[in-house]
C-alpha cells in the first residue's frame, strides 16, 4: 500500500475511536515527510535482505567477557580503571517532549542498513505530533568494532551538546557509513567537526570508553525484551504504560495504528 498524508490521517482518525482522540494529536505536514521517508525505506527493502539478530547469537554475546570485549574494545573482564569519568547506564537520549503521551523507543545499530533508512521516520512523526510523541534511541552494537565506536561517538557528542548533539551526530553517522561493519567514510572526529562539535574531544572520549555502562545497559535491555532484529521500536502509551513491540523498519502507518490500538485498549480497560 502506497502511503501518503491522506492515507495516514484517514487510518489514524478511523482507528482512534476514543472520545479524547481529537485532542490526542493533530498530524501536520510532517506526516508527508514521514510517508516520503517510508517510501524510500520500502524501496531499499526491495533491494537488500534484512539483517536479523539471532537469539542464540545475542545470548552468547551476553556472556560477560564477550560483552565487555564488544563494548569496551578490551580483553579485560572489567571496564578500564584508567577512565577519568564514567557515565551511568540510565542516560536518556530523547528527541521531543519528555511529557509526550507516546514514546517510541528505537533499538538500533549504526551499521545496520535498515536502521539508517528508518532513523528519520520516528523523528518525523515526533515533529508532526505537536508534542504528543517523543523518541528514545537505544544502542544494539552488533556489527563489531565499527558499531561499537559509532555508538560511543554518538554518546560522546551528547556529552558535548546534549541530546540535540546526540541526534545530530547519529544522523551524520548514518549518512557517512555504508553499513554492515564498514564504518564511516571519514574519521568520526571529522564527522563531528562538520556538524559543529569538537572532533578532537570526541576522539578522546571514544578512546576513554566513558559510556561503557550506557551502551552495555542498552544492549542488555534489548536482550531482556527478546529483540531479534534491528531496528525494533517499542511504542509506549505513557498514561497507562502499555506498550507494543514492532520489529523491523515499520512505516508511519504501522506506528500510528499501534498507537491507536494502545489508546483503544486503554479506554476499554478503564
Image: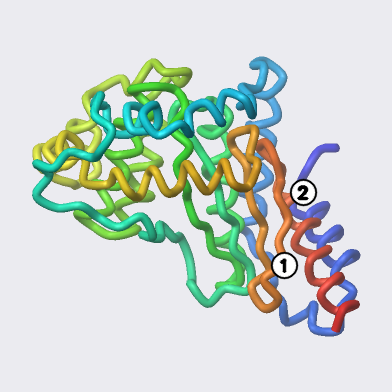
**Label 1 crowd (10 A; few <14 / some 14-19 / many >=20):** some
Q: Is residue 182 left or right of residue 149?
A: right
The quadrant holding residue 37 is top right
Residue on which disc 2 sits = 254
Which x, y percent locates residue 136? 49, 56
Q: Residue at x 64, y 73 (%)?
A: 238
Which x, y percent locates residue 31? 66, 55
165 is higher (above) or lower (below) than 192 = below
Residue on which disc 1 sits = 242
Q: Is residue 246 visible?
A: yes
Q: Nearer the viewer, residue 49 or 192?
A: 49
Q: Nearer the viewer, residue 60 or 205?
A: 60
Earlier residue among tags 2 and 1: 1
Q: Nearer the viewer, residue 125 or 236?
A: 236
Q: Secondary structure at mark 2?
A: helix
The quadrant holding residue 49 is top right
Amino acid at each position: 500500500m502506497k502511503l501518503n498524508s491522506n492515507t495516514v490521517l484517514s487510518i489514524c482518525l478511523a482507528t482512534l475511536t476514543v472520545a479524547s482522540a481529537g485532542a490526542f494529536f493533530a498530524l501536520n505536514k510532517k506526516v508527508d515527510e514521514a510517508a516520503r521517508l517510508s517510501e524510500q525505506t520500502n524501496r531499499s527493502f526491495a533491494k537488500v535482505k534484512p539483517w536479523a539478530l539471532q537469539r542464540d547469537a545475542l545470548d552468547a554475546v551476553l556472556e560477560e567477557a564477550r560483552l565487555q570485549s564488544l563494548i569496551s574494545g578490551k580483553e579485560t573482564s572489567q571496564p578500564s580503571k584508567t577512565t577519568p569519568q564514567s557515565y551511568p547506564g540510565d542516560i536518556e537520549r530523547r528527541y521531543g517532549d519528555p511529557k509526550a503521551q507516546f514514546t517510541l523507543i528505537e533499538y538500533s545499530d549504526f551499521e545496520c542498513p535498515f536502521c539508517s533508512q528508518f532513523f528519520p521516520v520516528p523523528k518525523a512523526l515526533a515533529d508532526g505530533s505537536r508534542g504528543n510523541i517523543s523518541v528514545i534511541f537505544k544502542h544494539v552494537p552488533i556489527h563489531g568494532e565499527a558499531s561499537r565506536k559509532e555508538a560511543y561517538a554518538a554518546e560522546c557528542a551528547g556529552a558535548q551538546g546534549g541530546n540535540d548533539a546526540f541526534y545530530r551526530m547519529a544522523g551524520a553517522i548514518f549518512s557517512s557509513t555504508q553499513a554492515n561493519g564498514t564504518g564511516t567514510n571519514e574519521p568520526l572526529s571529522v564527522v563531528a567537526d562538520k556538524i559543529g562539535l569538537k572532533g578532537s574531544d570526541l576522539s578522546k572520549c571514544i578512546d576513554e570508553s566513558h559510556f561503557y555502562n550506557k551502551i552495555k545497559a542498552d544492549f542488555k535491555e534489548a536482550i531482556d525484551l527478546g529483540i531479534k532484529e534491528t531496528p525494533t521500536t517499542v511504542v509506549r502509551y505513557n498514561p497507562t504504560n502499555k506498550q507494543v513491540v514492532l520489529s523491523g523498519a515499520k512505516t508511519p502507518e504501522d506506528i500510528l495504528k499501534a498507537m491507536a490500538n494502545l489508546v483503544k485498549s486503554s479506554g476499554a480497560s478503564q
